[in-house]
């Protein structure tokens, strides 16, 4: 049976909205942690999501 830590606090990522759990390295400044990863912190995730969304819109426009 895997070890689980069910009582760790979670919060949503400011960039992608996915929930992420508390980590020991964030213990001192958990209130200031906003992003789940370096990709979200630097905006790489947001750019990738925007590119995917634009590609979907572009495909829809081509069909019409």
Image (cartoon, helix red, strand yellow):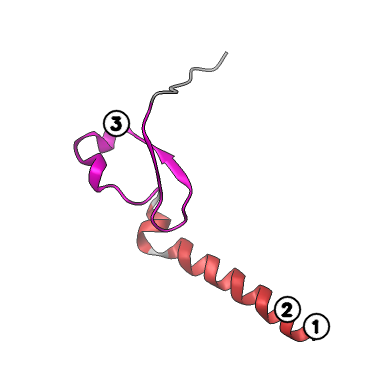
* Mark 2 lies on residue: 59
Q: Distance between the Cα atoms at labels 2 and 3?
A: 44 Å
The local secondary structure at tag 3 comes to helix
Q: Measured from the top left, where is residue 44 in percent x and y?
A: 44, 64
Q: Residue furthest right?
A: 63
What range is drawn magenta here?
A: 8-36
Mark 1 vs mark 3: which is more N-terminal? 3
**Residue plotted at (39% across, 23% down):** 7
* Mark 1 lies on residue: 63
The local secondary structure at tag 2 comes to helix
* Mark 3 lies on residue: 24
In depth, the one of 12 and 45 nearer the eye is 12
Residue 17 within the segment the image draws in magenta: yes
Q: Quadrant of the C terminus?
A: bottom right
Q: Image quadrant of residue 11?
A: top left
Do tag 1 and tag 3 residues touch (Cβ < 8 Å)? no
The local secondary structure at tag 1 comes to helix
**Residue plotted at (41% across, 57% down):** 40
Asked if residue 45 is positioned above or below residue 30 in the image, the reply reads below
């Amino acid at each position: 049976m895997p070890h689980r830590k069910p009582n760790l606090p979670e919060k949503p990522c400011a960039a992608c909205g996915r929930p992420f759990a508390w980590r020991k390295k964030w213990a001192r400044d958990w209130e200031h942690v906003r992003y789940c990863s370096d990709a979200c912190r630097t905006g790489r995730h947001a750019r990738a999501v925007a590119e995917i969304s634009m590609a979907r819109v572009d495909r829809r426009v081509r069909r019409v």
